[in-house]
Image: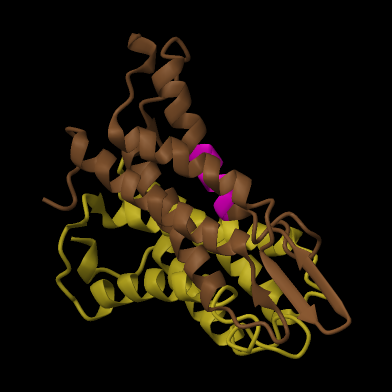
Chain colours: A yellow, B brown
Amino acid sequence: MANQQSPTPAEITIMSAGAVMIIFSFVSFAGDRSSWGKGLFPIATLLPLYGLIMGLQIALTKFASLDLPRSVLGFTWEQIHLALGSMAALMAIGWLLTDYGPKQIGMWFEILGGIALVVGAVMLQHERNTGAIG
Amino acid sequence: MDKLKISTANLVILVAGVVMLIASFLAFRTVSLPSFSRSWNAWSNGYFIISTIPALLGVLMAAHVALETYAPQVSLPDRVLGLTWTQVHFVLACQATVMMLAFLIQDIPLLDRGIGLFLMLIAAIALLVGAVMRMRENTGPRPFG
């Protein structure tokens, strides 16, 4: 199984995006507030949390050989990654288009991270030959 | 009369989607000071489009249910990105609910939560209930037994 091999490009993309999003969630998002700051938490915190969940699932199964159930609520893990990635990208586009004052470095990295998550999730479909895309 | 035949789950989604859209035009946030009061809806500048996303998701779900029920001649793909439509409904409803709960918790200094926010939250929960009911009705994945 892929679990014992080195991470694939899709897995690296998701883990990196998740890590970057968590780190930059503590950097200015709008004004001088981070996405954990008053007035932004928790709506702006959803993006890094989605990245954390996706990155953590990959990291735990890859490096800690954690044995997770093959599906959750009828969804395979590949489908969960695609769903979370798509919703993260939707919120990223939402923040990109929302006139919430000058966008700070934290917001830009959350937006880029959200898009990277969906790219990673789509790559994961191809790598694992789920047949969902292409 | 067949055209009026709609499952309970789909009816819940349809009604919740309509309520969600209407609520999005009501006060999302308000400010009330002795000499000044104002309100903003989910489409107002500064809120559009991040606050509008739950409403758009609700409209999308309701539109799909309406097409599926009242316009069966319209051909829709069986799956979207490998997900069945029932799974898509569940994902969209979860997202709408999570976002509305986040807006409920969000504490913006001086601003109060408006009736539109509360109605959108209730509609989002109703969308989720409808999506779960739809999963249980269908022969596809049954997440809750």
Q: Taking A40 as reference, is B29 above or below it?
A: above
Q: Taking A8 as reference, is B33 above or below it?
A: below
Residue A51 coordinates in the image, percent (x, y)? 47, 71
Q: Is residue B59 magenta?
A: yes
- The residue nearer to you, when weighing A115 against B40, is B40
Q: Residue furthest front?
A: B34
Q: Look at 73% across and 54% down and name the residue there.
A: B43
Q: Is residue A129 left or right of residue A100?
A: left
Q: Tell me the magenta residue range.
A: B54-61
Count how many numbered circles sit on residues in the image.
Answer: 0
Q: Residue furthest left?
A: B145
Q: Look at 70% across and 87% down and name the residue there.
A: B109
Tell me the quarter of the picture where residue A60 sits. Answer: bottom left
Tell me the quarter of the picture where residue B42 sits. Answer: bottom right
Q: Is residue A119 left or right of residue B70?
A: right
Judge whether residue A82 can be spotted in this image. no
- The residue nearer to you, when weighing B122 against B66, is B122
* The C terminus of chain A - image quarter: top left
Residue A90 coordinates in the image, percent (x, y)? 58, 55
Q: Is residue B57 magenta?
A: yes
Residue B49 coordinates in the image, percent (x, y)? 70, 56
Q: Is residue A41 left or right of residue B136?
A: right
* The N terminus of chain A - image quarter: bottom left
Q: Look at 38% across and 17% down and name the residue there.
A: B4
Prevalent SS, magenta region: helix
- The residue nearer to you, when weighing A65 against B59, is B59
Q: Look at 76% across and 90% down and name the residue there.
A: A32
Judge whether residue A2 can be spotted in this image. yes
